[in-house]
Amino acid sequence: MKTIVYTICKNEAQFAERFMASCAGADGVYVLDSGSTDGTPELLRALGAAVYEQTITPWRFDAARNASLALLPEDADVCICLDLDEVLCPGWREALEAAWAPGTTRARYTYVWSHTPDGGDGVVFFADKIHARHGYRWTHPVHEVLTPDRAESCITVPALRVEHWPDSSKSRGQYLPLLELSVAEDPGDDRNMHYLGREYMFHGRWGDAMATLMRHLSMPTATWAAERAASMRYIARCCDALGDWRSAAYWLERAADEAPSQREAPYALALLYYRRSDWPLCRYWAAQTLSITERDHNYMTEPEAWGAEPYDLMAISNWHLGQCNDAIAAAEAAVRLAPKDARLARNLEIMRQRGAKA
């Protein structure tokens, strides 16, 4: 099975060695460089990649992806689209070959989009950028998606793992104009409407964000509960930023109802009431958060909701409500999940000392 990795890049020399090392099991690595000035093309060539240089004007990610896809050998069986700040984890080829049967056209795999401060998994979901050589093209100027031109036969390969280790200082400034273009080109695409609203939120454009996210929620095709709930949470963040905590609570409660299997909304409600020192409601929503024990794998999950934080809120609210034993038990759980967090350890110590005197 001839398996090719392909990518686009610009000024990413810092990732070249790590990226190429992770691709060692591939039958070829093809790179389209769109104008590096830091020596990325030369370094990748020295490491064994086939590198082509091309300026994409005007810049859009789908055009660059399609140009890179066109570079691949016609007889390739499987194509893996990556970015230079991603790595294929050991065992990827064996997992892929064991699952890829004749007639397969696409594969979903475990994608670790972010990591926790201690290097653990953060946001994890299934991505689907592994595909057959023919029958696909990339669409949308940003947050581009792989679009088939024929019926697909898809498989899921959980053992194939790709990790994302980005440069946190890299600007996302180009995303907003490209998302505006994407929505202008295809105003009926609910996914891009959601992304545009989120991007306005990231830029602090609260009014634009709320209007766009509400537009997303009104679209007949916007039926994925997890994404709808995320739009509601983002509206709540905008309300909170504008000083309207009651509206923020309203939208978070709607989000909790929309996607009851997700922790993110009840966790945000517990945090909201913690900030208002409303200990009964903080405890209630922390308990609701912790009652959800199975984590969904989608790109809207937030690691904080699945870490020590809900237990911390449960501990603090119980403490203020005079429930010392319950507070200590929750604080112990928080410390087990984040043993290097000095504040959590100190809180637990204080609770134990004062609880013993009570």
Image (cartoon, rainbow, N blue to C red):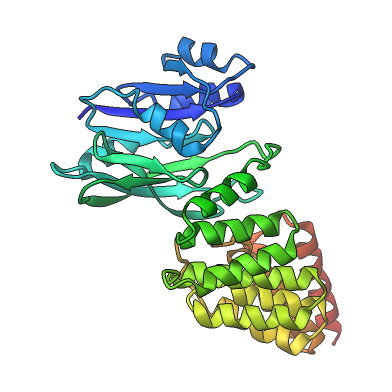
Q: Image point 64% across, 55% down: which residue?
A: 199
The picture quadrant where one finds residue 68 is top left
Coordinates of residue 178 in the picture (x, y in percent): 58, 44
Q: How many marks?
A: 0
From the viewer's perspective, is 342 left or right of 52? Answer: right
Q: Residue lying farthest left?
A: 102
Coordinates of residue 97 in the picture (x, y in percent): 23, 38
The picture quadrant where one finds residue 250 is bottom right
Q: Residue lying farthest front?
A: 184
In the foreground, 241 or 338: 241
Relative to 351, residue 149 above or below: above
On the question of residue 278 being in view, the answer is: yes
In the foreground, 352 or 9: 9
From the viewer's perspective, is 245 left or right of 158? Answer: right
Coordinates of residue 7 in the picture (x, y in percent): 44, 29
Relative to 141, residue 221 above or below: below
The picture quadrant where one finds residue 346 is bottom right
Q: Image point 69% across, 39% down: which residue?
A: 171
On the question of residue 299 being in view, the answer is: no
Coordinates of residue 291 in the picture (x, y in percent): 53, 80
In the foreground, 151 or 342: 151
